[in-house]
């Protein structure tokens, strides 16, 4: 039986790609083990007087190509193996897209929806204090991930600056624009995914118009993938979040209206919009159907986009997938067994470390702007992002052809070659 522990999967991916390029054994040993793992206890008194203990993690996987870089995740299922895998994938991703960073990742085992905002701020500030010695603009630069956002990043800057006695904007990326954030960072991961897909389409001589897409996850990443795909001519037919989803085979009229509806209702379910009127009552008029977050991946569409969490495409549902393309916007959404099943079915897997690298690319732009006291306009950011993503996607396709391997293996080969050269 294959284990779906993400860290073990990451190791297997590394070993496999290392064999193709005869990676130096010392380098392989370095990449097989994170440079440093940190686990901190975060005891806190909640507003109701109850004392709760949270666990915080930061894994610094590798810094051969620059400061450790990677997000912070707040989720009840965060554990050390997940954070280690995510940190490793950051090392690979940053090398694929060629930004001068190593890989890191962190998180807290907490469901932030159970905390009041002030409690979340207290927890974030305590965590920042406990990792302050090991983060910093030239050491390790966190960013948002699942359930973390610009506001949380601003608390980290504030706390870190207090501790070090100096305003240090570049200690994290993904900040609010008025607090040193970059234009376009919010949209970057989703837009980067769309640039990757469009470049793949060019390589494959395919056209977006009318291609149907179903997206799992409607947070930062899922929302912008949906918006930009719709703008580019793809037909977004299904969207889902953790509580369920909507499916309209003829195409969702406007992702923006669904976004507004979700903001009002707190959930996507029932957001069947005709013009600006969104209501479950519209379901029959639109020929729609309520679906679960799992069903969204099995719909009869051309492309599925997992944009929520890892291990959602498994041996149990892989055979039921009807799409011919999987754009992996989440990190690690496909288990190893599922990857093999889909490969045999000739499904094109566009791997996470390439598809979602737009986020860290604009994080790099933000860090650079902070350190150089610059502020670029959104158009400039998007233009630079497009150049980076098209180049990385082109390299991954060329490598896939050269070695006769999948895009996933090719992405690892591109990354390892770059890390081995040290540039
Ligand atoms: P987010 O917290 O903004 O959104 C997560 C979304 O997933 C929400 O809509 C939530 O309802 C949904 N979700 C949670 N559990 C689910 C489940 N079991 N089934 C279906 N949907 C579920 O997070 P995000 O920043 O959008 O990140 C999503 C994924 O993209 C993660 O894997 C993350 O690591 C990856 N990623 C994020 C960025 C970034 O810049 N934010 C960059 C690269 C990769």
Image (cartoon, helix red, strand yellow):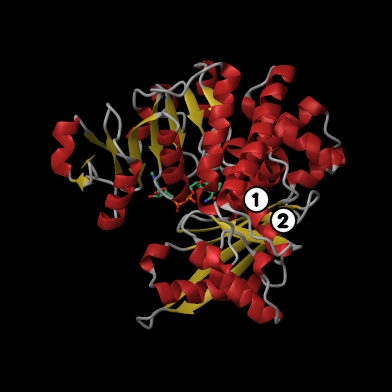
Residue at which label 1 appears: 87
Query: 104 and 172: which one is in front?
Result: 172
* Whole-percent x, y for residue 32 in the image: 74, 44
Residue drawn where x is 40% and y is 39% of the image: 216
Foreground disc of the pair 1, 2: 2
Q: Residue at x 71, y 57 (%)?
A: 368
Quadrant where the N terminus is found in the figure: top right
Residue nearest the viewer, comparing 38 with 97 = 97
Whether residue 129 is visible: no
The answer to whether the residues at label 1 and label 2 have Cβ atoms under 8 Å apart is yes
Give the residue drawn at x 64%, y 40%.
Answer: 10
Above-or-below relation of 161 to 29: below
Where residue 13 appears, as percent x and y from the top left, is 66, 34
**Which of the 4 quarters of the picture holds residue 264?**
bottom left
Tell me if residue 49 can be seen. yes
Left or right of 268 in this view: 388: right
Image height of 69 relative to 290, above or below: below
Q: Which mark is residue 104?
A: none
Q: Vertically, is 283 above or below 20?
A: below
Mark toward the start of the polypeptide (1 vs 2): 2
Question: How many residues crowd mark 1 within 10 Å: few (<14), some (14–19), many (20+)?
Answer: many
Numbered disc 1: secondary structure: helix
Q: Secondary structure at mark 2?
A: strand
> Residue 204, position in %: x, y?
57, 17
- Location of residue 416 (image quadrant): top right
- Vertically, is 157 above or below 195? below
Q: Nearer the viewer, residue 362 or 75?
A: 362
Quadrant into which the C terminus falls: top right
Q: Which residue is mark 2?
A: 68
């Amino acid at each position: 039986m294959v284990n779906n522990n993400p860290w073990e999967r990451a190791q297997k991916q590394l070993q496999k790609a290392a064999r193709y390029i005869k990676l130096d054994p010392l380098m392989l040993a370095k990449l097989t083990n994170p440079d440093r793992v940190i686990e901190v206890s975060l005891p806190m008194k909640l507003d109701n007087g109850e004392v709760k203990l949270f666990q915080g993690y930061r894994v610094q996987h590798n810094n051969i190509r620059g400061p450790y870089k990677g997000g912070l995740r707040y989720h009840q299922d965060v554990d050390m193996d997940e954070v280690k895998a995510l940190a490793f994938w950051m090392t690979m991703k940053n090398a694929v897209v060629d930004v001068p960073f190593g890989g890191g990742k962190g998180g807290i085992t907490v469901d932030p929806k159970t905390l009041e905002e002030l409690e979340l701020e207290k927890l974030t500030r305590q965590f920042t204090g406990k990792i302050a010695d090991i983060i910093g603009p030239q050491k390790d630069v966190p960013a948002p991930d699942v359930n973390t956002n610009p506001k949380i990043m601003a608390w980290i800057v504030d706390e870190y600056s207090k501790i070090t006695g100096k305003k240090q904007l570049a200690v994290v990326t993904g900040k609010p624009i008025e607090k040193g954030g970059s234009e376009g960072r919010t949209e970057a991961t989703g837009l980067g995914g769309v640039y990757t897909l469009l470049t793949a389409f060019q390589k494959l001589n395919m056209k977006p118009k009318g291609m149907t897409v179903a997206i799992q996850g409607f947070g930062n990443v899922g929302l912008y993938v949906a918006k930009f795909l719709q703008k580019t001519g793809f037909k977004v037919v299904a969207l889902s979040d953790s509580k369920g989803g909507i499916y309209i085979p003829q195409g969702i009229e406007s992702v923006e209206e669904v976004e507004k509806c979700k903001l009002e209702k707190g959930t996507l379910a029932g957001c069947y919009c005709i013009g600006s009127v969104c209501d479950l009552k519209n379901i029959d008029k639109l020929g729609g159907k309520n679906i679960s977050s799992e069903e969204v991946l099995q719909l009869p569409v051309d492309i599925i986009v997992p944009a929520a969490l890892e291990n959602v495409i498994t041996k149990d549902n892989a055979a039921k997938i009807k799409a011919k393309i999987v754009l992996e916007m989440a990190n690690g959404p496909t288990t190893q067994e599922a990857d093999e099943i889909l490969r045999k079915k000739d499904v094109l897997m566009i791997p996470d470390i390439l598809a979602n690298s737009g986020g860290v690319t604009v994080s790099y732009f933000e860090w650079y702007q902070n350190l150089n006291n610059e502020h670029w306009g959104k158009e400039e950011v998007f233009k630079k992002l497009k150049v980076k993503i098209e180049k990385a996607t082109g390299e991954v396709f060329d490598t896939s052809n050269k070695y006769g391997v999948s895009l996933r293996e090719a992405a690892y080969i591109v990354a390892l070659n770059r890390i081995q050269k040290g540039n």
